[in-house]
């Protein structure tokens, strides 16, 4: 599998943040169109691609989100990229398993920071992997339009994680939002009402990801959780319905626990939710 060198504008944007990004993006490949950047990054990782390898695509024909949902990825309308992360080989990393469980939350914080630093727009986060714009609801309460998503996929041998592929999609132009999701999704240019420098957003997000990955390596888990909670008001006091293997749970959110599980108060107890489809009421 071969790709191309990064477009000049993206290469320059990454060069501007190289000091903050460290090894993130030092090795990078670009595909004008591909099936999925996560699949490409997985193949590269299996072939020995180093920690921090960045895969970027101009379009995806088989982009996916959480629970196998399609991620609409038309040419030039959004940012579609993945990183190869290698937690193994760091024997002094205490709490590695917990760090991997918190990776999606940390990545959400990083993406929100990257967007704000590049374009001045401060998104919110919604458990477990959505980057959103919060809006008012005429009936009261909160509603959100999805701006981006995060998908972390690990490769393990036995109990040992060999690498994690972290995939990110961010809607930039209005045509990144499929008609079926009109009203439930949005894009940077829609929210800002002006053109957006997608290369700068991607570069700033990669630099922020490097910083939050370092916090995970250092075991600064409470710092990660505090930053995520500050950007995720929906994680406390919001009614939800969670579909789980054991059946549906209907209750009210009560934050996240130390491992990043969503806490839902229902039936006079608090349930930790680590997987399942969450319907926000």
Image (cartoon, rainbow, N blue to C red):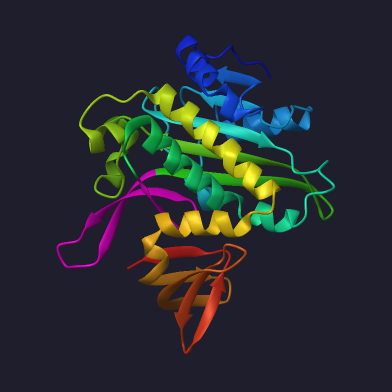
- Image side of residue 271 versus residue 88, left or right: left
Answer whether residue 187 is visible to the viewer in this image.
yes
Q: Position of residue 18 (x, y in %)?
A: 58, 22
**Quarter location, residue 206:** top right
> Residue 155 at what x, y percent from top left?
74, 45
| Residue at (46, 60) in percent of width and height | 229
Residue ID at (57%, 31%): 37
Q: Is residue 49 left or right of residue 65?
A: right
Q: Nearer the viewer, residue 17 or 68?
A: 17
Q: Nearer the viewer, residue 213 or 192?
A: 213
Report the quarter where the N terminus lies: top right
Q: Position of residue 63 (x, y in %)?
A: 50, 36
* Image: magenta residue range: 123-147
Q: Is residue 96 left or right of residue 269?
A: right
Q: Is residue 58 magenta?
A: no
Estimate the x, y position of residue 116 in percent, counting from the top left: 37, 38
């Amino acid at each position: 599998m071969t790709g191309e060198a990064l477009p000049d504008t993206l290469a320059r944007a990454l060069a501007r943040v190289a000091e903050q990004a460290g090894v993130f993006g030092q090795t990078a490949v670009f595909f004008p169109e591909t099936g999925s950047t996560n699949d490409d990054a997985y193949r590269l990782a299996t072939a020995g691609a180093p920690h921090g390898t960045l895969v970027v695509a101009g379009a995806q024909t088989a982009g996916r989100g959480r629970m196998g949902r399609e991620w609409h990825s038309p040419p030039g309308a959004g940012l579609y990229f993945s990183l190869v992360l290698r937690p193994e080989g760091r024997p002094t990393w205490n709490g590695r398993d917990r760090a991997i469980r918190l990776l999606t939350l940390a990545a959400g914080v990083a993406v929100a920071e990257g967007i704000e630093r590049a374009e001045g727009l401060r998104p919110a986060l919604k458990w477990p992997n959505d980057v959103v714009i919060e809006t008012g609801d005429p009936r009261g309460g909160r509603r959100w339009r999805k701006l981006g998503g995060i998908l972390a996929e690990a490769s393990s041998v036995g109990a040992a994680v060999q690498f994690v592929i972290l995939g990110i999609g961010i809607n930039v132009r209005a045509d990144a939002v499929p008609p079926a999701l009109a009203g439930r999704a949005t894009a940077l240019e829609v929210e800002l009402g002006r053109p957006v420098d997608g290369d700068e957003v991607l570069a700033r997000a990669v630099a922020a990801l490097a910083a939050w990955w370092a916090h995970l390596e250092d075991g600064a888990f409470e710092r990660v959780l505090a930053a995520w909670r500050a950007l995720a008001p929906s994680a406390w006091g919001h009614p939800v319905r969670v579909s789980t293997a054991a059946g549906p749970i209907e209750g009210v959110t009560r934050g996240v626990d130390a491992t990043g599980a969503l806490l839902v108060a229902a039936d006079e107890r608090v349930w930790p939710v680590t997987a399942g489809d969450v319907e926000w009421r």
